């Protein structure tokens, strides 16, 4: 898979040795990076130092760090690959059993809130290589101003998504949660999980969100899903899914502009399965008591594609129980005699 182009335009300046803000390599904390040795403790030690001291944690390129339990990062910490002569990324390879969240952002442990994360995750690879759970890689608990860019996520057939956020009192009280002003841009995410893979990029209960210029392929659920969010921009993303949608539910002030979404067959069987829509605006579930209605949604300039053999029925763009929705200048290309979507 090709790397995001931003990698080549975003070299990391390295302060002089001994500087108070000098980057911290995970190797300085004993991480080996051969993909065999369990580097969880060493990587977490480096992330903790950077979270506590506003520093940048570096994954040397070409290294694979085996991670067997969830990680934590918060505050003004950054996480980058170290640019050397190699163009390979540093990789975190997760095999964390039944853990539903693999990388906790904004807390230092379960039910331990910290300063909201406002750093950058850039030019790394996040890969799931084992596990028994259905879950998410990056989970945002307390964030204000964080950025994820130029990052590659690969989950194979494991049903994990690249990002998500929401309330789960088993991990953090909803009263302590903060999700504001988050940017997720120019990332690549790939799944071959058939119809079981979870969202590509998902976010919940967020105020201020930009999802821009990402490439998401093969996802078996929502390629992009925003739930109970406000002030969202979803634009210029290149997407493919087996049965998923750009999914904006119970959300207010959402712009869905200039995305390209294609229905594709399952990666494991090569067969198409029925999807519901390529863009869906509506409610999370039929019982909506206690949640605001989706409102002020602008769906414009998107291209929606059904290849030959696709099976969807119903609306390519589906709107359910929403208020003040504008749909304009979208293109639907239907090459399948089995599809009646409109």
Image (cartoon, helix red, strand yellow):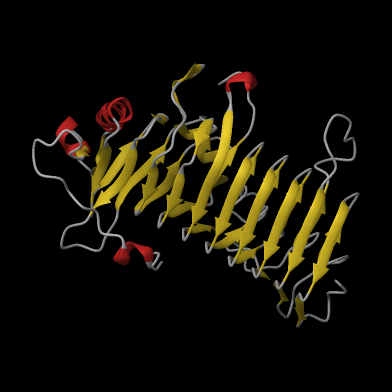
Q: Identify the image quadrant of residue 238.
A: bottom right
Instruction: Mark yes or no: residue 170 visible.
Output: no
Locate residue 30 relative to residue 252 in the image: left or right. left
Locate residue 235 relative to residue 21 in the image: left or right. right
Say which of 314 and 97 sits in front.
Answer: 314
Q: Residue at x 38, y 68 (%)?
A: 5
Q: Residue at x 58, y 63 (%)?
A: 267
Task: Report x, y in % for residue 52.
Answer: 31, 25
Task: Report x, y in % for residue 286.
Answer: 90, 40
Task: Report x, y in % for residue 292.
Answer: 83, 37
Task: Report x, y in % for residue 189.
Answer: 50, 57
Locate residue 118 relative to residue 192 in the image: left or right. left
Q: Residue at x 58, y 65 (%)?
A: 237
Position of the N terminus by quadrant: bottom left
Q: Residue at x 45, y 47 (%)?
A: 147
Position of the C terminus by quadrant: bottom right
Say which of 148 and 286 sits in front.
Answer: 148
Q: Identify the image quadrant of residue 175.
A: top right
Which residue is most to the left? 17
Q: Looking at the image, how many numbered discs can be counted on the residues?
A: 0
Locate residue 228 relative to residue 79 in the image: left or right. right
Residue 309 to residue 210: above or below: below
Instruction: Mark yes or no: residue 273 visible.
Output: yes
């Amino acid at each position: 898979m090709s790397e995001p182009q931003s990698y080549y335009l975003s070299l990391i300046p390295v302060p002089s040795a001994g500087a108070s803000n000098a980057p911290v390599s995970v190797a300085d904390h004993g991480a080996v990076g051969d993909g065999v040795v369990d580097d969880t403790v060493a990587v977490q030690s480096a992330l903790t130092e950077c979270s506590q001291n506003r520093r940048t944690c570096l994954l040397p390129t070409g290294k694979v760090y085996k991670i067997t339990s969830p990680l934590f990062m918060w505050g003004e910490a950054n996480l980058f690959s170290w640019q050397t002569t190699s163009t390979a990324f540093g990789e975190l390879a997760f095999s964390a059993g039944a853990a539903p969240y693999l990388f906790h952002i904004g807390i230092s442990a379960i039910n331990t809130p910290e300063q909201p994360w406002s750093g950058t995750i850039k030019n790394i690879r996040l890969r799931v290589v084992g596990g028994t759970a259905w879950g998410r890689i990056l989970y945002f608990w307390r964030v204000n101003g964080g950025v994820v860019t130029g990052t590659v996520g690969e989950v194979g057939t494991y049903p994990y998504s690249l990002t998500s956020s929401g309330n789960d009192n088993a991990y953090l009280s909803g009263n302590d949660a903060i999700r504001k002003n988050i940017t997720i841009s120019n990332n690549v995410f790939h799944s071959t999980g058939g119809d079981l893979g979870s969202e590509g990029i998902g976010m919940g209960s967020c105020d201020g969100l930009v999802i821009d210029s990402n490439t998401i392929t093969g996802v078996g659920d929502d390629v992009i899903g925003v739930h109970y969010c406000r002030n969202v921009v979803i634009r210029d993303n290149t997407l493919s899914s087996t049965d998923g949608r750009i999914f904006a539910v119970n959300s207010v002030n959402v712009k869905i502009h200039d995305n390209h979404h294609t229905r594709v067959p399952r990666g494991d069987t090569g067969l198409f399965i029925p999807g519901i829509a390529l863009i869906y605006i509506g409610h999370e579930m039929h019982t909506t008591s206690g949640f605001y209605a989706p409102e002020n949604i602008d769906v414009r300039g998107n291209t929606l594609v059904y290849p030959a053999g696709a099976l969807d029925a119903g609306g390519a763009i589906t709107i359910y129980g929403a208020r003040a929705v504008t749909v304009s200048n979208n293109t639907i290309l239907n090459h399948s005699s089995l599809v009646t979507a409109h």
